[in-house]
């Protein structure tokens, strides 16, 4: 018996569009319905102003995706996307709304381990370009195109301001499974990633993949296999039986 259908809301990394997740639609089993969450100011929402405050962005996304957030859903976020996914889960709890069946945090330190100096001095084009090159994952054609680079830098700057505005508040662990993915060669210290365990009030897992901050690209199939594995586990046994009757 296959698991029940679940919406997987996927949030992009800083400077990116949710189109980074579109190909997952043909790589995931049909019972996992990928929902790329586009943020204002990019992709299909290019004409909209950026939202540069963390709490405001989370509230807006919760309103925009209220239908999915009322059903059976999971959250996936890469880098900044993981932080926003965490914010959505926390807001859902605060408003006593349905919680995600799982939270997947990829390439991100735990919310309690955010570095307030991470974005210091990154408020001009030269600093943003240097950071893009350091992180890797940006196609060469972006740097070669003045128009594409301008769009990317504007988006990245806005997203960095979102991250800067985040303030961690001590709270009880989320009563949902938390699954963390990380790159073995990422420059985020292992203990800052492992601290996600403190946010998990249910099952916790941590998978390491070959590569740096953008391991999600070369290891895409391995990452998706882990997502499927963890969701199958979530819906197995008594949980699966209960979900099938929901």
Image: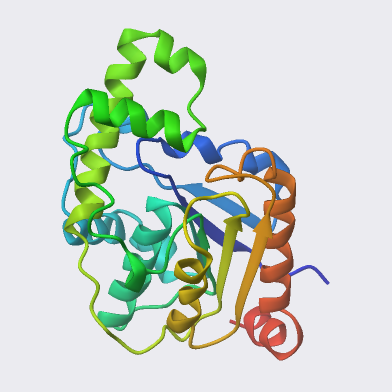
Residue 245's spot in the image, x, y percent?
A: 64, 83
Residue 192's spot in the image, x, y percent?
A: 44, 68
Q: Is residue 42 left or right of residue 27?
A: left
Compared to residue 113, the image places residue 47 above or below, namely above
Quarter placement of the C terminus: bottom right
| Residue lying at the far right of the rendered structure | 1
Compared to residue 219, the image places residue 101 above or below, namely below
What residue is at 18 percent from the left and 28 percent from the top? 124
Q: Is residue 200 left or right of residue 237?
A: left
Compared to residue 87, the image places residue 173 above or below, namely below
Q: Quadrant of the rendered structure where residue 41 is?
A: top left
Q: Is residue 228 visible in this depiction of the protein?
A: yes
Q: Is residue 83 left or right of residue 108?
A: left
Along the line of sight, the residue nearer the viewer: 232 or 197: 197
What residue is at 37 percent from the left and 52 percent from the top? 80
Q: Is residue 29 visible in this depiction of the protein?
A: no
What residue is at 29 percent from the left and 22 percent from the top? 151
Q: What colouring method underlies this structural image?
A: rainbow
Compared to residue 142, the image places residue 16 above or below, namely below
């Amino acid at each position: 018996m296959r698991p029940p259908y679940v919406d997987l809301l996927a949030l992009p990394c800083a400077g990116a569009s949710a189109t980074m997740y579109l190909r997952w639609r043909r790589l995931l089993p049909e019972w996992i319905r990928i929902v790329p969450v586009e943020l204002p100011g990019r992709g299909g929402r290019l004409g909209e102003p950026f939202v540069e405050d963390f709490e405001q962005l989370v509230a807006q996304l919760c309103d925009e995706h209220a239908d999915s957030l009322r059903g059976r859903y999971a959250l996936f976020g890469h880098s900044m996307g993981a932080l926003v996914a965490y914010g959505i889960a926390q807001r859902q709890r605060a408003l006593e709304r349905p919680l995600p069946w799982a939270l997947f945090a990829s390439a991100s330190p735990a919310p309690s381990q955010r570095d307030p100096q991470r974005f210091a001095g990154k408020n001009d084009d030269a600093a943003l370009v240097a950071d893009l090159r350091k992180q890797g994952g940006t196609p060469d054609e972006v740097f070669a195109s003045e128009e594409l680079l301008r769009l990317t830098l504007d988006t990245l700057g806005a997203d960095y301001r979102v991250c800067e505005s985040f303030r961690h508040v001590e709270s009880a662990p989320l009563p949902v499974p938390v699954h963390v993915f990380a790159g073995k060669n990422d420059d985020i210290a292992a203990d800052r990633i492992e601290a996600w365990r403190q946010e998990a009030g249910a099952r916790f897992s941590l998978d390491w993949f070959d590569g740096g901050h953008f391991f999600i690209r070369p290891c895409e199939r391995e990452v998706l296999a882990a997502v499927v594995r963890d969701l199958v586990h979530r819906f197995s046994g008594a949980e699966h039986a209960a979900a099938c009757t929901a």
